[in-house]
Image (cartoon, rainbow, N blue to C red):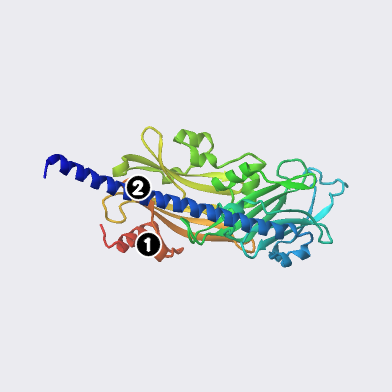
Amino acid sequence: MPKHRKRRIMLSIVSIVLFVVLSAQLSAVSFSVTAAGEHGELVAEEYERYRERFDRIEKIGDLENQGFRLLEDQIFAMPLQKLPEEAVDTTEELGDEVWFYAALDTRYHRLAVFIADASGQILYKTDQLEANYCYLGEMRQPVKKLASVSFQDVDNDRDTDIILIVQCHNDRGDYQEESYKVGDVLFQDDGNFYRDYRISDKINRFDMNKNPACILNFVRDGRSTEFLYTAETLADLLNHNFNVIEEQSYTRNFEKLGKLKVVPGTYRMAEYDVFMIYLIDEQGNIVWSFQPMEDYDNLYALKGIQGKDLDGDGLKDLVVFAKYSYEGEDGELLVDTVCTIYYQRTAGFEKDTDFTENYECTEEDTLEALVTKIRAYWGWQT
């Protein structure tokens, strides 16, 4: 067969293959776009029906008929206005008293807040809350309960504002089976309330959502943990009053990352100590950061930090042993003893999900004993 004819046949075959591949890809893209569009239309229709039910609620007694479950442990009387703190001996009357109610949509687990008069007539209602946007583009949300309600004058205008903390639990997605809190503030303006999404975003993005005191400290007093997550150098941290725990700070050679100083410390929010650990290079730059206290309220006691190879791969890992406090269901102080492990990998550190899920720390544990147990778990000793 002539060479030019072979070349034409090969080009024809390649063209056919490319056509089939491109057609398949375009079909897949077309299908995904169509599916996304259909899903969006379905959600829009569901939301419209949900809003019709929500809009029909005019009295607290209407909640059940419209598919909402009243949270009976979250019913409170609240004054619309607060007296200044210095007015201890004044005879001035408090503003009109209304009632706060919260309810959960039984189908979609969306939280709603209601302000009503003594007869149950609704004066204000909203479901435009941060917790109802955890699953973006979906009706159903991971709201489990309203964990905390606090009535405070947040913006110093003598009107009573509302601080909300919602407990959520993801049942799917990247953070499946994770529980977390979502904070929110409803600002009052002459009997009506509004939410500033920018403030809510910072409250939750920078973990100032653990309790009402932290939210108040941020919104009213201007203190913020944002710098703990955005600082680039040790100097940035110190300039924002980060308190280094010097007795647990030391320098190690972390193989892949080089010579680094381990810098643990705290930042005070209200009456709570937010605990962070940083790895700092010789130029003072932050190379890595850790937040071992996660959703706990406060660092109760730091028992120790060690940088040693724990899993036998020749790279130094980090183990943190500490006690953290938090508020229980009835407002009592609870303390947990926790071991957190970070394994050094090629691109940084990876949090342990093996040993800590199979071992529960006790008051009798020591850091040295834990290191031995972790190494034994991975089947080696030094």
Location of residue 5 in the rendering, given as x and y in whole percent from the top left corner: 16, 42
Location of residue 197 in the rendering, given as x and y in whole percent from the top left corner: 63, 44
> Mark on residue 22?
2
Position of 123 relative to 10 (above/below):
below
- Residue at the spot 47% in from the left edge and 57% down from the top edge: 173
Badge 1 crowding class, 10 Å Cα cut-off, few under 14, some 14 to 19, many 20 or more, is some
Q: Secondary structure at mark 2?
A: helix
Q: Is residue 293 visible?
A: no
Question: First in sequence: mark 1 or mark 2?
Answer: 2
Q: Is residue 185 left or right of residue 25?
A: right
Badge 2 crowding class, 10 Å Cα cut-off, few under 14, some 14 to 19, many 20 or more, is few
Nearer the observer, 70 or 40: 40
Nearer the observer, 349 or 213: 349
- Residue at the spot 82% in from the left edge and 59% down from the top edge: 121
The quarter in which the C terminus is drawn is bottom left
Q: Is residue 301 left or right of residue 282?
A: right
Q: Is residue 125 visible?
A: yes
Residue corresponding to mark 1 = 355
The image quadrant that residue 187 belongs to is top right
Location of residue 172 in the rendering, given as x and y in whole percent from the top left corner: 49, 60
Nearer the observer, 248 or 331: 331
**Residue sitting at the far right:** 91
Location of residue 357 in the rendering, given as x and y in whole percent from the top left corner: 41, 63
Q: CA distance from mark 1 to mark 2?
A: 47 Å
Q: Amino acid at mark 2?
A: Leu
